[in-house]
Image (spheres, rainbow, N blue to C red):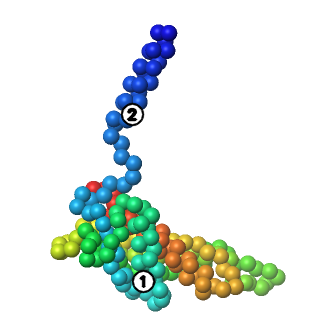
Amino acid sequence: MLRKISMTVMCAALVTLCSSCGYHIGFIKHPQIDSLAVAPVINQTTSYNAASDMRMMMSEGIMQDGTYKLSDQKRADAILYLTVTQIGFNEFDDASVERNNQYKPSEWRTTVAIGYKLLIPGQGQPIRSGTVKGTAQFQANVDLESVRLRSARQACYEAAKKIIYQISEGW
């Protein structure tokens, strides 16, 4: 009987100790910023749809992350400015070879470089700025162009996740 009571007291003390440690699950955001807006993206590459894909993937990333609320530019606490500076498609896996005939590469890698600035409206200096890269891999099939576009979109999403991590941590 005494052993049951002492075990109950120890378990209660352990639960109280663990629940009062003050751990925070998730990212820590800037104290002045609750909502973000994604400004129209600047595309410095020759790849079409890069700006719209990056803006769409950045907006989706903000909504899925949940640290900040997505808002329009008039009501947002901060505005995120993005620039697509590079998109590259490189052979990732060797080309298939059969009887001295070389065929197209079987796997490719897409790399996207994005510059970003996070500004509070009315302030001149950015709160955060930098450059991130996102990558994605794809296999070459019959319709190479549509697969490249989907791969560029996926690389933009990977870059968007990195941007969210960088602007929501470290406060």
In this picture, residue 142 sits left or right of residue 146: right
**Where is residue 163 drawn, in percent x and y?**
38, 67
Could you say whether the residue bearing mark 2 is in a helix, strand or loop? helix
Q: Dot 2 surroundings within 10 Å: few (below 14), some, or many (20 or more)?
A: few
Residue type at the position of mark 2: Cys
Relative depth, front residue between 156 and 12: 12
Q: Name which residue lies at 22% across and 70% down.
A: 120
The residue mark sitting in front, 2 or 1, is 2
Q: Name which residue lies at 58% across and 72% down.
A: 137
Relative depth, front residue between 33 and 42: 33
**Where is residue 4 drawn, in percent x and y?**
49, 15
Label 2: which residue? 18
Q: Dot 1 surroundings within 10 Å: few (below 14), some, or many (20 or more)?
A: many
Label 1: which residue? 51
In this picture, residue 110 sits left or right of residue 57: right
- Image position of 33 with respect to 137: above or below: above
Residue type at the position of mark 1: Ala
**Where is residue 19 drawn, in percent x and y?**
37, 35
